[in-house]
Image (cartoon, coloured by chain):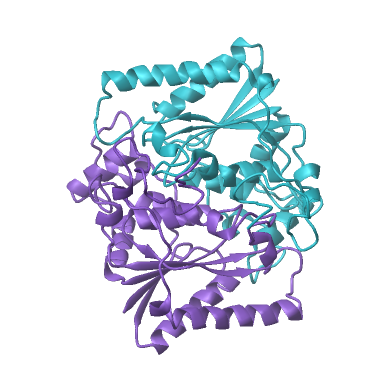
Chain colours: A cyan, B purple
């Protein structure tokens, strides 16, 4: 198996970077090949916009979908985006490692989605969901959070984790991935103390072991259920009898 | 009333920019003062990281919360962030105008949240939610989407709008805002056709009128309900008897 790890954290010595290292070691120990896309180290530019499109379809008014499609059709996709798409094409499994910032992913990672999942290159009106480009590949999120783990329960003040992760999961499903259950490392903070207290260091070690254990048994994990396009009618709503797999898409109001 | 409009779209002639213009005209016609934070025009840098912190608390390992707090305490917050915070402080009402990209906000806007809502400057462990810095201010999201409106219903393939917007709403509530119901302009695409079909142009005009009408009656709109910190116990879970105001925070599993 060839694994890609997409890391979105600004600090090479961070807990997130250490989890990435744990993942690299785990995959190698299993005989898999691995590559890492360290977005901050690559100085990836997250804001989609005109500067990334050298040859414009429509110079007088920038539209992201128009220009992404044109760049793909003319072979002028920006080099950084083309490189990321190639990494995805090579990978059988993609691990995303990132901190939860403000109930979602860091802007760097959102920008990677905005710029890399191109109209034309990665999806089209026909090539998505059950016909997605990355059909056959699997993805998994490994996320860290400062707030304590109970706060990510169904009745927790941070909001239920599965619901906070839905937009990222949904984006991956849109382009054809199957998504495995996420791995959460909560209650690891920065900012309050310059040196980590002993109990936090113990928990960091336990989380690393937990991630390694999880990555060691990927084939035993059932993918999360998501609605495919066939579940919806021409108006964009669930067909009668089709189940809704989350609060975001429900059969009943 | 002093209004701030935060716009996150790369194209000055976009539908989003036109909605921003509609909002400016509407506020002025009502006798309010207005300022616009056009993030792409300002070339706002969305990726939080070490380059934004000239004087580090801890040079050997970057932590966003540590450095945000230190910058605030030493008066060395980056000029662009300080300017955005000042705009928020001046505003009674903040309108966010942006396109839904991949089930969420563009990376540019997420980066504005990541960098501007600083630990120390905008929130602390004590200064949040019902004690949030921006208590007394109101905010509203005006979002555009390419997919048709029914697809953002409770049974729509895009996912229910209110749930897609929850992380942004929750972030605003976290720092003290009351949040008014969002305004959605759906089914306006880019990328398929270079010139808009007549029916789409009619819908664009109707959306502009709708936004103007909505902004003309803000005081008649009830804020969306969100749980405050007082609803949660020390473990971070809802106290017995406290309601959960959304699928993200529920009293029952």
Q: How many discs mark residues in the rendered view? A: 0
Residue B50 point in image, percent of width and height = 35, 40
Left or right: residue B80 compared with residue A39: left
User: For the point 72% across and 53% down, which residue is it?
Assistant: A119
| Whether residue A184 is situated above or below residue B182 in the rendered picture | above
Name above or below for residue A86 compared with residue A171.
Answer: above
| Screen quadrant of the N terminus of chain A | top right
The structure residue drawn at horizontal position 71% and vertical position 61%, both measured from the top left corner, is: A66
Q: Quadrant of residue B149?
A: bottom right
Q: Nearer the viewer, residue A93 or B163?
A: B163
Q: Is residue B132 visible?
A: no
Residue A103 percent across, percent down from the top left: 45, 46
Q: Quadrant of residue B197?
A: bottom right
Q: Give how far across and how far down residue A24 sits, in percent.
A: 56, 19
Q: Position of residue A36 (x, y in %)?
A: 57, 28
State the quadrant of the C terminus of chain A: bottom right
Q: Compared with residue A122, is residue A222 higher up or lower down, i.e. above or below?
A: above
């Amino acid at each position: 198996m060839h694994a890609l790890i997409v890391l979105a954290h600004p600090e090479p010595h961070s807990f997130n970077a250490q989890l990435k290292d744990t993942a690299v070691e785990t995959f190698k120990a299993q005989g898999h090949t691995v590559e890492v896309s360290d977005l901050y180290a690559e100085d990836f530019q997250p804001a989609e916009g005109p500067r990334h499109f050298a040859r414009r379809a429509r110079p007088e008014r920038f539209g992201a979908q128009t220009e992404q499609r044109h760049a793909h059709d003319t072979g002028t996709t920006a080099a950084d985006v083309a490189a990321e798409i190639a990494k995805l094409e090579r990978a059988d499994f993609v691990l995303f490692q990132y901190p939860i910032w403000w109930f979602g992913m860091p802007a760097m990672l959102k920008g990677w989605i905005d710029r890399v999942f191109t109209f034309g290159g990665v999806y089209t009106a026909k090539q998505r969901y059950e016909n997605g480009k990355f059909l056959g590949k699997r993805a998994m999120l490994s996320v860290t959070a400062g707030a304590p783990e109970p706060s990510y329960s169904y009745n927790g003040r941070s909001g239920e984790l599965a619901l906070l992760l839905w937009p990222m999961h949904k984006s991956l499903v849109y382009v054809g991935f199957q998504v495995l259950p996420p791995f959460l490392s909560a209650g690891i903070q920065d900012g309050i103390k310059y040196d980590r207290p002993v109990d936090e260091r113990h928990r960091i070690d336990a989380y690393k072991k937990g991630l390694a254990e999880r990555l060691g048994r990927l084939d035993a994990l059932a993918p999360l259920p998501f609605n495919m396009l066939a579940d919806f009618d021409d108006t964009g709503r669930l067909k009668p009898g089709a189940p809704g797999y989350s609060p975001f898409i429900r059969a009943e109001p």
